[in-house]
Image (spheres, rainbow, N blue to C red):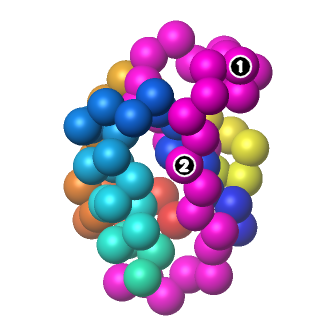
Amino acid sequence: MKIEVLGTGCAKCKSLYEAVKTAVNEKGVDAEVVKVEDIPSIMKYGVMSTPALVIDGKVVFSGKTASASEIKGML
């Protein structure tokens, strides 16, 4: 599984990245967690508002953050 956190480095983006890492560790999922900060890569997903979460190439949400428990429900 590949999980991408899209964002330019703002506090909310960093918070989402940390929540994703926590969720992956707590659930014991084998996943590659990647932080994507460059605008062209973010735009290829059609995301207009960050942070955004992409799981296996599919944008699951954008423009908000989520807790580790919410993310665990998505994995």
Q: Considering only vertical position in the picture, is 31 above or below 13?
A: below
Q: Residue at x 46, y 28 (%)?
A: 8
Q: Residue 26 bears which disc, if any?
A: none
The answer to which image quadrant residue 54 occupies is top right
Magenta residue span: 26-54
> Is residue 55 visible to us here?
yes
What percent of the width, then of the height, locates residue 13? 35, 39
Q: Considering only vertical position in the picture, is 25 above or below 21?
A: below
Residue projecting furthest to the bottom: 28
Q: Is residue 2 left or right of residue 73?
A: right
Q: Residues within 10 Å of mark 1 (few under 14, many from 20)?
A: few
Q: Secondary structure at mark 1?
A: helix
Q: Give the camera-side residue of 28 and 15.
A: 15
Sequence order check: which comes first, mark 1 or mark 2? Answer: 2
Q: Residue at x 49, y 88 (%)?
A: 28
Q: Is residue 75 left or right of residue 58?
A: left
The answer to which image quadrant residue 43 occupies is top right
Q: Residue 35 bears which disc, if any?
A: 2
What percent of the width, then of the height, locates residue 65? 29, 39
Q: Residue at x 24, y 37 (%)?
A: 11
Q: Per the image, is 34 magenta? A: yes
Amino acid type of the residue that numbered disc 2 sits on in the rendered structure: Lys
Q: Residues within 10 Å of mark 2 (few under 14, many from 20)?
A: some
Q: Per the image, is 31 magenta? A: yes
Q: Residue 40 bears which disc, if any?
A: 1
Which quadrant does the N terminus fall into? Answer: bottom right
What percent of the width, then of the height, locates residue 64? 31, 30
Q: Give the camera-side residue of 9 and 54.
A: 9
Q: Considering only vertical position in the picture, is 71 above or below 30?
A: above
Q: Secondary structure at mark 2?
A: strand
Q: Give the camera-side residue of 21 and 59.
A: 21
For the residues marked 1 and 2, what is the alpha-carbon distance in whole angstroms? 14 Å
